[in-house]
Structure formats: C-alpha cells, structure tokens
Image (tube, helix red, strand yellow):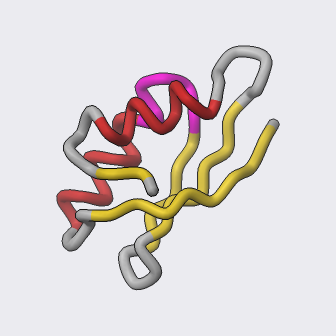
Amino acid sequence: MTNQTLQVEGMSCNHCVISIEGALQGIGAKGKVDLASNTVDVSYDENGLTIEAVKEAIEEQGYEVV
C-alpha cells in the first residue's frame, strides 16, 4: 500500500468529506479528509491504481488537487 497526503482546495463541509471519501472508496482507495488543513490522506495499492487516478477521482467531485 502507498500512503500519500494531497493538498485539496474547495473543501468546506461534511458533504465534501463524504463526497471525496466515497469517490476514493469507489476506485478502491481509502481516504481521510482533514478540513482544517485542506488535506486528504490517501492509501491505495500502487499495483492497481496510480496517483493520477486518485487525483482524478477527487477532481471529478469538483475539487482541485494542488
């Protein structure tokens, strides 16, 4: 498993948390959103997913990975 922390812009509420964590779960990754620091801690299997796919899943929800 690979663990990475991503900086994400546009998160402000519990809906954001549910949206991002649900999208990551949908592609087989685990995510933990921290609204206070605007970060998402992501764990994923690098043999099945790329960091680009993880970022795309977040961005498809309307957030910007910086």
Please give left or right for residue 1 compared with residue 36 in the image.
Answer: right
Q: For the image shown, how many numbered marks are present on the structure?
A: 0
When the figure is inspected, residue 17 is found, relative to residue 38, above or below; the finding is above
Q: Position of residue 30 (x, y in %)?
A: 57, 42
Quarter that holds the C terminus: bottom left
Q: Residue furthest bottom?
A: 36
The residue sitting at 41% across, 26% down in the picture is 26
Magenta stretch, residue numbers: 24-29
The residue positioned 26% from the left and 46% from the top of the image is 19
Q: Is residue 12 above or below residue 58?
A: below
Q: Where's residue 1, x and y in %?
A: 81, 36
Residue 58 appears at what percent x and percent y? 37, 41
Residue 5 is covered by the magenta coloring: no
Q: Nearer the viewer, residue 23 or 53?
A: 53
In the image, farthest residue toward the top: 48
In this rendering, position of residue 4 left or right of residue 12? right
